[in-house]
Amino acid sequence: MTKFYLHPYLLMPLLVYISWYDYRTMEIPDAGWILISLQALAGRPDYVWALAVFAVLSLFSLAGVLGFGDVKLCAAMALRCGMRILCVLVIASGLALLYCITKKEIHVRIPFAPFLCLGFVFVLLC
């Protein structure tokens, strides 16, 4: 069975919308992670990594460190890229840290989806 995935460039408008929406409202639209999941399900999804990411990040969400929309978005991305979701999380966390440092505020709520989307695009294109 061959993988059937949309080219990463075709996912760009969706990722831009998710990023913009999260930046404006601090919420991630359900349609965003659902569409990424459906697109990943058309190929050969990596259920193990998606479940692992969902379980671990849910603990962060319960602790109030991460929003549950971010957890769902990461799990959808893990369906698509499997183990490379770790690279997405490292890139996203590094970019978010740089953003906080430039704002000179470390303990502040920030929209995390734009950083996740940037990391996801980078991993898909490499």
Image (cartoon, rainbow, N blue to C red):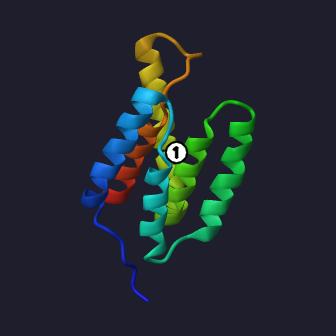
Answer above or below: position of 69 versus 3: above
Residue 109 placement, left or right of 36: right
Mark 1 residue type? Leu
Classify mark 1: residues with Cα within 10 Å, few (<14), some (14-19) or many (20+): some
Residue 66 in the image: state x and y as whole percent. Answer: 62, 35
Residue labelled with disc 1: 89
x 71%, y 53%: residue:
55
Residue 65 in the image: state x and y as whole percent. Answer: 66, 31
Helix, strand or loop at mark 1? helix
Figure quadrant of the C terminus = bottom left
x 50%, y 25%: residue:
110
Q: Quadrant of residue 54?
A: bottom right
Q: Quadrant of residue 83?
A: bottom right
Figure quadrant of the N terminus = bottom left
For residue 126, say whether it is visible.
Answer: no
Answer above or below: position of 36 versus 112: below
x 63%, y 54%: residue:
53
Residue 70 in the image: state x and y as whole percent. Answer: 55, 42
Nearer to the camera, 49 or 87: 49
